[in-house]
Image: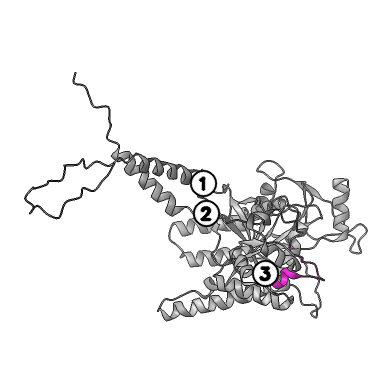
């Protein structure tokens, strides 16, 4: 028997490895760093979460967090309007930090201090969430100004799309209102947030859920 | 290792210095190592399921100026959510010793799941009108007797018809969001068109308290 060479041609394997690397790199999107861990309940709904959202999260202790999607200037303007309303001043660094955050849950008074922390320190920041009671309803202001900014940005995008000769659906450019509640949270807390939305006449809400099997469909 | 042979600017020199013939093979081991490392990383961190959303339209806040009308609800069921239990009663609520002389409302208990006494069985029974209509329309759609726009319109009509079941959801102070969403989910499975989360009345709360023993 001829002595065969101990080296194997590994080209196909390496090809495949690179193919997979490329696939996973392109298909994966990194989970954004959120201020609280929220374990959502499951439902049979299979509507994928929309792109343009204003999201209020409620963790299992009932703390409320606010977050919104959108370009950097939308968030900058949002913080600007809120700062004006609450008589606060933010430095450029703090504004930059605000834009980077996915969501946050702190009193407006704590905001400058909160923004000066690093993202690791923010995790341990003791806060009671965004106040949403009738005397100090900051959540309502966040949602109101967030909605205004999202609508004006959406209008711009809509006009741009129309100029390009596309036939855009106006509804796609309006923000959608998302509630991300922890399954263990008490419903009364979620109801407070729902009432805030309803006070602003925003009645069409969406709950974030994970997918479960629909018993109507056959296996 | 890979090296680029330096050629001395052409072969015109007298000495005719030739570049040594080098192997064209490059050692790719580190690169492949890295590729597999990255592969492992992305495989382990990849999450494929994007979160889903469940849409729920709340009734608009009633105008304070407009006087409330007592609405006669026919064909309605009210679910009352307690911490980890679920109660219901059919039709309107009648407290003990009411003026109309109707027997006082009694709460029944239901459970999640698909077995006896479950919300799903109950709703399938009570919402038979819509579900049967849907089966007929599904068949018509399959046989191309109706267009799908007609189908969606007819389904919507059936869901809001007088005979269709209407559901009210009331929660006590301990009910969790999971229970609430599970219930909405059951309602969507049973094709309930009218879902109204409303405030609980004190008399109903008392009945729940008696049942849960709190």
Residue found at x 43% / y 44% = B39
Q: Is residue A142 magenta?
A: yes
Q: Which mark is residue A30?
A: 2
Same chain for marks 3 and 1? Answer: no
Q: Which residue lies under the disc numbered 3?
A: A203
Quarter of the image holding residue B180? Answer: bottom right
Helix, strand or loop status at disc 3: loop
Q: Give whichever of A173, B106 is nearer the camera.
A: A173
Q: Earlier in the sequence, mark 2 or mark 3?
A: 2
Give x and y (percent) for residue B71: 78, 70
Q: Which residue lies under the disc numbered 1?
A: B45
What is the spatial separation of the Cα atoms under label 2 and label 3, in whole angstroms? 31 Å
Say which of marks 2 and 3 sits in front.
2
Give x and y (percent) for residue A160: 46, 79
Say which of marks 3 and 1 sits in front.
1
Helix, strand or loop status at disc 2: loop
Is the residue under label 2 in contact with that under label 1 (CB below 8 Å)? yes
């Amino acid at each position: 028997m001829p002595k065969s060479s101990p080296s194997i041609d590994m080209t196909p394997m390496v090809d495949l490895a690179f193919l997979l690397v490329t696939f996973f790199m392109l298909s994966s999107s990194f989970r954004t760093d959120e201020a609280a861990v929220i374990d959502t309940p499951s439902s049979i709904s299979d509507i994928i979460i929309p792109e343009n959202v204003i999201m209020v999260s409620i963790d299992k202790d009932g703390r409320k967090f606010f977050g919104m999607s959108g370009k950097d200037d939308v968030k900058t303007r949002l913080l600007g309007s809120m700062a004006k309303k609450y008589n606060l001043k933010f430095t450029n660094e703090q504004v930059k930090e605000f834009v980077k955050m996915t969501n946050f849950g702190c009193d407006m008074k704590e905001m400058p201090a909160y923004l000066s922390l690093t993202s690791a320190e923010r995790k341990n920041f003791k806060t009671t969430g965004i106040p949403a009671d009738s005397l100090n309803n900051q959540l309502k202001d966040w949602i109101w100004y967030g909605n205004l900014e999202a609508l004006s940005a959406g209008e711009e995008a809509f006009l741009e799309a129309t100029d390009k000769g596309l036939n855009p659906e106006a509804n796609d450019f309006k923000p959608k209102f998302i509630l991300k509640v922890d399954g263990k949270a008490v419903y009364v807390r979620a109801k407070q947030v729902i009432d805030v939305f309803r006070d602003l006449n925003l009645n069409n809400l969406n709950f974030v859920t994970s997918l479960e099997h629909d018993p109507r469909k056959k296996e | 290792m890979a090296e680029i042979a330096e050629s001395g600017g052409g072969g015109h020199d007298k000495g005719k210095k030739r570049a040594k013939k080098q192997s064209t093979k490059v050692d790719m081991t580190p690169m492949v190592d890295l590729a597999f490392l990255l592969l492992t990383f992305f495989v382990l961190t990849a999450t494929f399921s994007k979160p889903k959303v469940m849409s729920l339209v709340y009734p608009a806040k009633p105008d304070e100026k407009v006087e409330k009308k007592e609405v006669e609800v026919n064909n309605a069921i009210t679910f009352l959510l307690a911490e980890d239990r679920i109660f219901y009663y059919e039709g309107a609520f009648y407290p003990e010793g009411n003026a109309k002389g109707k027997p006082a409302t009694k709460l029944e208990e239901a459970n999640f799941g698909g077995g006896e006494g479950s919300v799903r069985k109950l709703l399938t029974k009570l919402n038979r009108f819509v579900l049967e209509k849907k089966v007929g329309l599904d068949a018509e759609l399959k046989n191309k007797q109706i267009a799908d726009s007609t189908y969606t319109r007819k389904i919507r009509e059936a869901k809001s018809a007088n005979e269709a079941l209407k559901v009210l959801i009331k929660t006590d102070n301990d009910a969790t969001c999971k229970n609430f969403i599970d219930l909405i989910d059951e309602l969507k499975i049973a094709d309930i068109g009218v879902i109204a989360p409303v405030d609980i009345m004190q008399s109903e709360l008392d009945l729940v308290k008696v049942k849960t023993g709190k």
